[in-house]
Structure formats: C-alpha cells, structure tokens
Image (cartoon, rainbow, N blue to C red):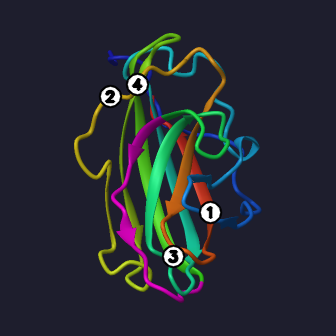
Amino acid sequence: MADGLFYNDIREPFVTVPPGAVTLTAADKALYTASQFPVLGGQYFARPGKKVKIRLFGQITTAATPGNGTFDVYYGTGADANGVLLAASAAHVLIASQTNQSWALEVVVTCRTTGSVGTLFCTGTCDFTPAVSAAGGGLIPASAPVVSAACDLTAALIISVQFKRSGSTVETIQVLEMEVTALN
C-alpha cells in the first residue's frame, strides 16, 4: 500500500525557442513571460506540501560597470517586480566585460498554507561561471529562510524568477533552458 499517489510531472510548454534576452536595470526584471511558464491555474497549491521545482539555465553579458546581481523569486502575474517576494539570493559581485557566460538556478516552492491568504516557502541555489562572479553562486534565500507573506493561492498566478543589477551600464540576461516540475 502506497502512502498516496505522488509523482513528478514535467510541465509544458517546453522551451524550444529561448525567451529573448532581458536588459537589466536596478529593478527586478522577469526572466520569462507568463505565457512562457506552464499554466498552473487557480488552486494549484490546494494542499499543504504541494511543491513545484523550477530549473533555469542561461547566459549573461556584462558591461564596464555591472555592479551586483541578485535573483528574486516572486509569486504574481509574471510582470517585472510584481507579486509577493518569496526569496532572494545574495547580491553577487558581477565581473565586467563578459559575454554570454553561463548561469544556473534551481528553486523549490512549497505550499505551507492554502487559500486566498495562503503561504509559500521557497529554497534553492544559483550558480555562475567564475568569469561572471568569482564567488560562483549560493543558496536562495541567502539567509533567514521564512514563509512568505500572504499569497492568493486561489488565483491563476505564476512563480516568476527575476534578476536585477546595481551597476550603471547595460547588461543582459537570457534563459536558454527552463524545466518546471510538479513534485507531488
């Protein structure tokens, strides 16, 4: 007898043509649009413990003064800096004048409480090639993991991975591969 019918399910749409490169600013910029993310629909997080894993791989180009870069994970519409911030990476010191250098990110978002004032918990990792950030990567969140503020888990919203930089020149980031997996 099984404890329940739990499974891993890679969700469509699959990335066959990567999303366009995003020009970074000091404000969070969504790395993909809502239409490029699998439809979870309202009530996706309908029970405590429901999880989704997001794995991204991409490239980043830096210019003369890129500053620091930070990954932020939101639950919202998928628009720039929209929704409830679930977790953030540390600010990574970006190395200037790099072209199409690799980065990777993996986060797991878990439902803790349900409903129109539900809560989510987000943990993960990010990594950069040493050419982009000498420190490499790190954990998400960088410190003090906490359950999110209230999220309307009855609405058809998405998990939106976003990035911002503190520098004063033009940098771009692009998702080349995205995998979204329902974990149970």
**Residue at the spot of label 2:** 147
Q: CA distance from mark 1 to mark 3?
A: 10 Å
Name the chief secondary structure element in magenta: loop
Residue 175: assigned label:
1
Q: CA distance from mark 4 to mark 1?
A: 27 Å
Residue 20: assigned label:
none
Residue sitting at the far front: 168
Which residue is found at the position 59% from the left and 78% from the top? 169
Q: Determine which quarter of the picture holds residue 123.
A: top left
Query: Which of these two is toward me, 118 or 64?
Result: 64
**Residue at the spot of label 3:** 102
Mark 1 vs 3, N-terminal side: 3
Mark 4 belongs to which amino acid? Ala
Q: Secondary structure at mark 2?
A: loop
**Residue at the spot of label 4:** 149
Q: Is 141 located above or below residue 146 in the figure? A: below
Query: Which of these two is toward me, 40 or 101?
Result: 101
Give, as a single range, the part of the protein colored magenta: 85-99
Of the two numbered discs 2 and 3 in the rendering, the one whose residue sits closer to the viewer? 2
Relative to 77, 181 lies left or right: left
